[in-house]
Amino acid sequence: MNNPFQIQPELRYGAPVCDEILTGRFFTIGYSYYFRQAKWTLEIVNRNDHLLTEYERLNNFRADTRIPQRFRAGLGAYNGNGYDRGHLVASANQKFQQIQNSETFLLSNMSPQHPNFNRQIWRKLEEAIRELNAREDILETYVLTAPVFYFQIPIQTIGDKKNDYGIDIPVPHAFVKSVLAEDKRGRLSLWTFEMKNEPLDGALSDYLVSTYDVEQIVGGRFWDRVNGADLHQQKKTPSEMW
């Protein structure tokens, strides 16, 4: 079997451990059978933007049949429970081919998100990352996104026992985005954000955290193919940097 780290460009700088790696056409999912959702996703933002054709958001949500039924979410799990099917790889980050956008609507790329989190500050962060990626000096932008579970806090679940094989989907307490930008001189800059899965106020800079600390919570090194001395973790606010 081919090593996905050798053929998937978004895995160039490494990824955490997981139960199964699901290699897509345009991004990679590290899946957790235990949590019935991605442990992480990894993408290169709009890596096909040279095609200069944008497609409308497809909204074709569907189960990921690569995952055994007993370990995957179905559409019924999200019906009427008050949570959004929250994208980990944003739809707008993959929009230059129909199949590229379609892949983002696999439920393996979704986690239950509070609506006023998903549609407000999470969206604001996604838009800021695309602004970073559009800068003239940026060559590529890699984004690792991960649900976070705090084991000292009770975990709520959602699910449709009648239609989705009795699967319960745990609701993450928070989400992490770790953004690795490579500029045209080869310099690597890193920003990592941790946000609770609830309505949040304030600036994006309020949620900048140490990558090392978040790796401890998620359980794995994010960019393990890069020497730590070559990573420049940014302490300034996004508005100052971007």
Image (cartoon, rainbow, N blue to C red):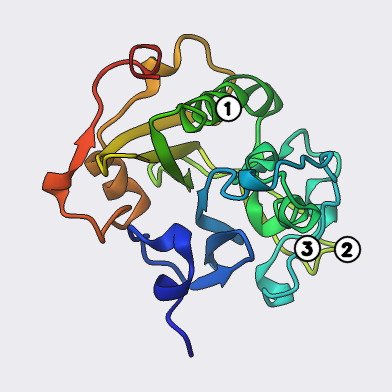
How many residues crowd mark 1 within 10 Å: few (<14), some (14–19), many (20+)?
Answer: many
Q: Name the foreground residue: 209 vs 51.
A: 51
Residue at left 54%, top 16%?
A: 200
Q: Is residue 240 above or below residue 10?
A: above
In this rendering, does residue 160 appear at all?
Answer: no
The disc, 1 or 2, on the residue closer to the chain's N-terminal end is 1
Q: Amino acid at mark 2?
A: Asn
Q: Where residue 212 sits: x, y (%)?
A: 22, 43
Disc ID at residue 163: 2
Whether pointer 1 and pointer 3 mark residues with C-beta atoms closer than 8 Å, the reply is no
Q: Amino acid at mark 3?
A: Ala
In terms of secondary structure, where does tag 2 sit? loop
Q: Quadrant of residue 139?
A: top left
Residue at left 84%, top 45%?
A: 59
Q: Where residue 91 sits: x, y (%)?
A: 70, 42
Disc ID at residue 63: 3
Q: Quadrant of residue 176?
A: top left
Q: Nearer the viewer, mark 1 or mark 2?
A: 1
How many residues crowd mark 2 within 10 Å: few (<14), some (14–19), many (20+)?
Answer: few
In this rendering, does residue 50 appear at all?
Answer: yes
